[in-house]
Structure formats: C-alpha cells, structure tokens
C-alpha cells in the first residue's frame, strides 16, 4: 500500500532552462513516464500469477474460443477505425469522457485516432479481465489492476499526446511547462501530489472555527467542548468520534459547511475528539489504547462535566468502528454510558469492503504485523495515497495533468485540503485493524474479539442507532454500511444519502442540496430495502437532528462556560493537536 514512492521515483532536472522548450518537454515527459511506472509497480498485483492468468484465459476450448472472438473483434474494430477515422460512429466514440472534452480530440485526426484507439484498447483489456476464470478475490484484484492500468495509460496523461498541453505550451511560449516542472519539484519535496491551493487555508483562521475549548487531553487525543449557540440546550450531550486516520475538522470545515456548528445551533451540547498525529515515541499503542484513551476517557469526562449519566454518541468511518467496539465492551460489562449511537459511513460488518480489499490479504497483513511487532508508525501519507488509487482519475491523474502538464495551480478546496492533512497511526493499531476487521471480519462475530477484559458482542448494545451511508462511497460501500445497521438490532434507522464518502456526509442543511432515502424494513437484501424507501430532497442533517433531539431529553438553560471545576479549559479550539503535521 506504499504509493508514496510514486512521486519520489520521478526524475527531472532541478534547473530546466525556460529558453530550451525541447529539454523541458523531454524532462516533463520522462518524469511523467516514471510517475506512471512507479504507480503501476505499487498496484496490488502480488496475487496475480501470470501463468495462472494465461491458464484462466486459455485453459479450455471454450475459453480459447471466447478469447479468439475478442481478438477478432478487436482487430476488426481497429481496421474499421483506420479505414474511416473520420466516422462519427467509429469504434471507441460511443462513450462520453470528460478527460477528452476538448474539441481537438474530435477535430484533429491524430488526436481523434489517439482517443478512439485508447478507447478500443481499454475495452479490450476490460473484456479480457472479465473473461478470465479466477477465484473471486483474484478476479476482483485483476479487475482493479486492469482499471488502474487503463487509467494510467490514457493519452491525456502525457505531454506529447495531450492537445491541451501542447496548446498551452504554445500560447505561453513554454511557461506552462516550466511551471509544471516547478510544481513537480515542490511536490517531490512534499512526497505527495498537491490537490488544492494549500496557502488558501489555515486551521483556526478559516477552518475549524466553531467556538469552543479543549477541556481534557491525554497523549492520544484532545477533547473539545463547543460553546453553546442557543439559550436552551438539550440535557443529554453529544460526543463525536471522528476517524483517527484524518483530522477531526472534516466535521468543522468552514462555517457554511460545518457539521459541528450545525449540531451546536440545534441546541446539542457538543464534544468532539481531536486525535493526535502520533509521534514516534507513541508508536507502540494499539486498538485497546485508543478505546480507553479515545472513547472511555472522553465519556467519563463528559458525564462529569454535564452531569448526564448517558451520552449520545456519533462515529464517522473508522471512528465509528472504534466507538461501536468500545460501547460493546461497556455493554458486556453492564456499564451503560451511551444513550444512542449514530454511525456515518462506518463498517462493522467487513464482508464486502469494496476495492480497498485488493490491497489487504494474508501476506500483506503478516508483513505489517512483522514490521510493527515492536511498534512504529504507519504514515498517514501512505494511507492517503492508497485511498487515492480507488479514484485514480479524480485524485491522481487529474492533478498530474493540471499541475505538471498544464502548469496550473490546483484550485482551493477545503475538502481536498483536509484530505491532504492525514495523521500518522501507531503500527500495532493499524495491523490489528487490518487483521481483525478487513481480513477476518471478527467484529461481527459475538465473542470472537476480547478487548479490555471483555468479550465484544455488538448484539448487546441494545440502544437506538442511526446509520448513514453514501450511495457513491468508494471507501465504505453503502451495502456494507447497510449490513452494519442489521447488526445493531431493531431500533436502528438506516438512511442512504447521495454522493461519496466525504461529500455525502458533509452536506450542509442550509444549502438544501442532494437527496436521501429513508424507510423500509431492514430486510436481508439491501437492494430490496432500497426498493421500499422514499426519496427525500435535501440534506440528511435535518432528518438526523430531529431523530437525535427526540433522544436528547429535556431542554435547560445553556451553560455559561465550557468545562467544569475539575475540567478547566486549557486552550481555545481547535487546540494544538490538530495543527501538528508529520509526513
């Protein structure tokens, strides 16, 4: 999963003269090819044996006949394309692809041939991958790797075969290419591709602005309590546990799209865990440490501050997995600390983890366990690079073309700024998560895991639950989140929203955009549930806040200050942990 080598492997001259365009083009082309080569080397192809693949394609007379038919069709289509490249209905012209929107791809014969030839090759490779008779996991890996190869080899990813790049170079007299090399040099130093104008954002200046204070901290996290925004607040507080892979401010971006601010404005006394970007000396921490320091400790502090015996809880992504695990342990110990559980884009049942599963097999997990046996850090940048491959055209090649080939600065975008601001994880925590969740799916089996001296049984939670999933989520497939909902008992409401893993969650109520689906019994088949639902326009935030309000008790006058005599504020939000950046 180490895709960070992609950038570091790309050679280029540090001082490319602007007055020699040929050298600049050559350097940029060589760097781009090296980037593609490194990208392809890092793909999860370790489970794809070439001999086995050949056998899967030619091992029977029927397979050989199908392969011959594919090859014949491919050669026939190529011949038709060469004979009539100007035809509007020529092979490879049927699909719409925004990478090839410029008129030159249609109006200039050479680029038209490149585009249509690429489309033919892409379809041919896809059909071959579909033809191979392999075990399900190997077939899934083959499909993923094939798609990555197809995306990486697109002609728009290379300076000499992208008309937009050539046109920009002519119009700017080579300045665009020189700027592209400067951007590549900058990103090589960072070890990652720039996805946004990072100078446009700063935590505490225009991100993470909701007023509040750090009222408790330990070596793993800071607990932030937000100042009330209403005269009356609900008596039962809300604890938010975000993913520890990233910084918490995905839920407190700018005022207009801050989920935290929305919670406070609805009258919820809101607390959030701000995970630390773990330093080397804490690299031996594990899953139990994060449960104790990142869930149990905040619950204790919140109850003492507010006087409420139980707390409404919300977890996002892996933060939700950690939260549900911790609450299940408390349930086994008959310590009811949570009144309700909200899970956003979270997996508890890992039977279908989507494309990310192609990276996680027994061999990889064993390597991680051996590497982190004595501790160590899993760099957040490595995880971010891996997740980017799940949507490579949007999160890799789009920026390669924009930043390096076109020489443009990426546009400011708060979601992508956050996406580039990952956190390092303790290696043992990471290895435990991979084996017990992704590889063996132990969390869903009652008693399979024993943590903090108790068996983990999600069936013992027995509390109202709200499970939100996003329809186009590439990290937590919505069907997997649906199976999560079915693990939590009859008092669970499942809601399906539009968009992806982050944009689906960060869908401000004030903008009233997108849509979501509710209703329907939690039957076994998620598609059957979907057929029974009702479409609701706008953001799911209002639906959730009404659900939570009904479980938050009576209202009372808002507290005049954050914290308590025992838990005095130590610094204003967003705190110092969230500002720490490491590789």
Image (cartoon, rainbow, N blue to C red):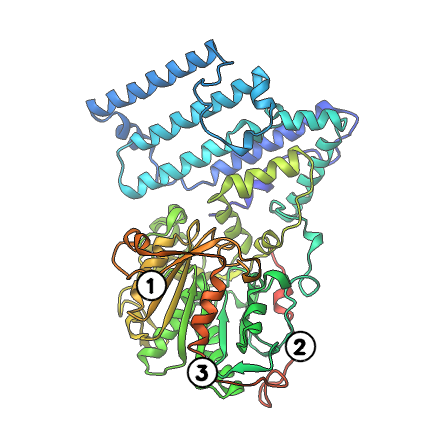
Q: Secondary structure at mark 1?
A: helix
Asked whether 189 or 88 is in front, the reply is 88
Q: In the image, 428: left or right of 112?
A: left
Q: Which mark is residue 553?
A: 3
Residues under labels 1 and 3: Cα distance?
A: 24 Å
Q: Secondary structure at mark 3?
A: loop
Residues under labels 2 and 3: Cα distance?
A: 30 Å
Q: Which residue is mark 2?
A: 571
Against 564, residue 550 (above or below) is above
Residues under labels 1 and 2: Cα distance?
A: 38 Å
Is there CB contact under 8 Å for labels 1 and 3?
no
What is the residue that sits farthest to the right in this orientation?
Answer: 19
Residue 567 drawn at (x, y percent): 58, 85
Q: Quadrant of residue 272?
A: bottom right
Q: Which mark is residue 485?
A: 1
Mark 3: few/some/many CA within 10 Å (<14, 14-19, 20+): few
Is there CB contact under 8 Å for labels 1 and 2?
no
Q: Nearer the viewer, mark 1 or mark 3?
A: 3
- Residue 349 in view, yes or no: no
């Amino acid at each position: 999963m180490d895709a960070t080598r992609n950038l570091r492997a790309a050679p280029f001259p540090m001082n490319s003269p602007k007055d020699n365009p040929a050298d600049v083009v050559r350097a940029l082309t060589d760097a781009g090819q090296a980037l593609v080569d490194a990208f392809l080397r890092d793909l999860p192809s370790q489970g794809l044996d070439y001999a086995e693949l050949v056998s899967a394609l030619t091992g029977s007379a029927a397979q050989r006949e199908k392969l011959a038919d594919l090859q014949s069709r491919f050669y026939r289509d190529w011949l038709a394309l060469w004979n009539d490249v100007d035809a509007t209905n020529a092979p490879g012209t049927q699909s719409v692809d925004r990478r090839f929107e410029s008129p030159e791809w249609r109006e200039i014969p050479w680029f038209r041939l490149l585009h249509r030839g690429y489309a033919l090759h892409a379809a041919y490779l896809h059909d071959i991958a579909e033809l191979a008779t392999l075990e399900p996991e190997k077939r899934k890996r083959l499909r993923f790797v094939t798609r990555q190869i197809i995306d990486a080899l697109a002609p728009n990813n290379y300076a000499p075969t992208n008309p937009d790049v050539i046109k920009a170079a002519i119009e700017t007299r080579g300045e665009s290419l020189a700027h592209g090399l400067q951007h590549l040099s900058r990103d090589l130093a960072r070890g990652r591709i720039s996805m946004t104008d990072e100078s446009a954002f700063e935590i505490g200046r225009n991100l993470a602005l909701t007023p509040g204070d750090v009222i408790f901290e330990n070596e793993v996290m800071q607990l932030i309590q937000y100042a009330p925004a209403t005269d009356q607040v609900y008596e039962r507080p809300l604890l938010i546990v975000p993913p520890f892979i990233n910084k918490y401010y995905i839920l407190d971006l700018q005022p207009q799209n801050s989920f935290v601010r929305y919670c406070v404005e609805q009258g919820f006394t809101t607390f959030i865990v701000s995970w630390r970007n773990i330093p080397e000396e804490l690299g031996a921490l594990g899953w139990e440490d994060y449960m104790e320091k990142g869930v149990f400790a905040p619950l204790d502090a919140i109850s003492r501050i507010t006087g409420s015996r139980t707390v409404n809880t919300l977890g996002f992504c892996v933060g939700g997995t950690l939260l549900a695990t911790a609450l299940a342990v408390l349930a086994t110990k008959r310590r009811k600390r949570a009144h309700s559980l909200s899970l956003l884009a979270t997996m508890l049942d890992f039977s279908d983890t989507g494309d990310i599963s192609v990276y996680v097999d027994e061999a990889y997990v064993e390597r991680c366990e051996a590497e982190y046996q004595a501790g160590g850090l899993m760099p957040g940048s490595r995880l971010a690079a891996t997740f980017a491959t799940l949507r490579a055209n949007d999160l890799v090649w789009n920026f390669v073309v924009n930043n390096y080939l076109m020489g443009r600065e990426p546009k400011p975008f708060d979601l992508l700024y956050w996406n580039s601001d990952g956190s390092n994880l303790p290696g043992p925590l990471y290895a435990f998560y991979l084996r017990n969740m992704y590889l063996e799916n132990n969390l869903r089996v009652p008693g399979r895991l024993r943590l903090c001296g108790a068996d983990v049984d999600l069936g013992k939670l027995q509390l109202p639950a709200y499970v939100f999933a996003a329809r186009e989520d590439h990290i937590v497939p919505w069907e997997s989140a649906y199976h999560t909902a079915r693990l939590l008992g009859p008092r669970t409401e499942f809601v399906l929203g539009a968009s992806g893993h982050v944009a689906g969650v960060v869908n401000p109520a004030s903008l009233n955009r997108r849509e979501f689906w509710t209703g329907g019994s939690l039957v076994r088949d998620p598609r059957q549930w979907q057929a029974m639902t009702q479409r609701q326009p706008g953001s799911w935030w209002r639906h959730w806040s009404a659900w939570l309000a009904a479980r938050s008790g009576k209202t009372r006058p808002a507290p005049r200050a954050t914290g308590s005599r025992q838990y005095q504020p130590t610094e204003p939000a967003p705190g110092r942990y969230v500002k720490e950046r490491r590789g």
